[in-house]
Amino acid sequence: MSAAAVAVFCGSRFGARPVFQEAAREMGHRLGQAGMRLVYGGGDVGLMGTVADATLEAGGAVSGVIPTFLEAREVMHQGVTDLTVTDSMHSRKQLMFARADAFVVLPGGLGTFDETIEIMTWRQLKLHDKPIFIVNVAGWADPMLGMLRAAVENGFAEASALDLFEVVPDVATTMERLGAAIRSPVVDDASRL
């Protein structure tokens, strides 16, 4: 069986607090040490670059996926194990999904929110049953989690929507949960997306 692969969604900026970059660095190191392949957005900037560099430093493999129009904007990472350039954001997300056995959400902005909500929606629609972990570093995800709870409270989502993901407080807990969750990865039909 090939090594488990984990897609990490995170910011192309560093954010306002050093703890965000520390978490991205720790995530990369731990993935590399655990022999798990990192699948990420292919950039060499912000938390994206940090998690990729840390995975490589720890001896891990990194698969970057970046759309053509972001090659220069996100300064495409030339040092990753393999890099795929796609024709659109949508095909980027489809490929990241197809290559991953689980998803980890670190601090980020609009792009991170977009990826997170889409992968949750696909799970709600039963297009996959891969685990999704939101790492709530220093409470950064609290507003997003509040929005999701408000959708349920206001009748726009079933309470079960809150079971589509797991909130974890830190990287160490994330790695424990990943180890348990992806021992037997599920193969999904990515063509359904």
Image: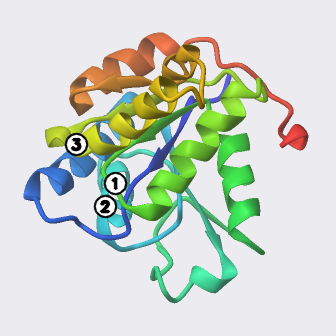
Residue at figure coordinates x 44%, y 63% from the top left: 110
Q: Earlier in the sequence, mark 3 or mark 2?
A: 3
Q: Crowding near pointer 2: few (<14 within 10 Å), some, many (20+)?
A: many
Residue 85 to residue 91: above or below: below
The amino acid at mark 3 is Glu
Residue 35 to residue 186: above or below: below
Disc 1 marks which residue? 51
Disc 3 marks which residue? 26
Q: Crowding near pointer 3: few (<14 within 10 Å), some, many (20+)?
A: some
- How far separated are the C-alphas under marks 3 and 2? 11 Å
Q: Are marks 3 and 2 in contact (CB under 8 Å)?
A: no
Q: Nearer the viewer, residue 192 or 48?
A: 192
The amino acid at mark 2 is Leu
Tell us which disc is closer to us: 1 or 2.
2
- How far separated are the C-alphas under marks 1 and 2? 6 Å
Secondary structure beneath dot 2 equals: helix
The amino acid at mark 1 is Val
Q: Which mark, by number, is residue 47?
A: 2
Q: Which mark, by number, is residue 84?
A: none
Residue 149 to residue 55: above or below: above
**Along the horizontal axis of the image, is 8 left or right of 89?**
left
Q: Nearer the viewer, residue 124 or 39?
A: 124
Can residue 35 be seen in this snapshot? no
Residue at figure coordinates x 73%, y 62% from the top left: 90
Q: Are marks 1 and 2 in contact (CB under 8 Å)?
A: yes
Across and down, in percent, residue 193 comes to 83, 43
Q: Nearer the viewer, residue 62 or 42?
A: 42
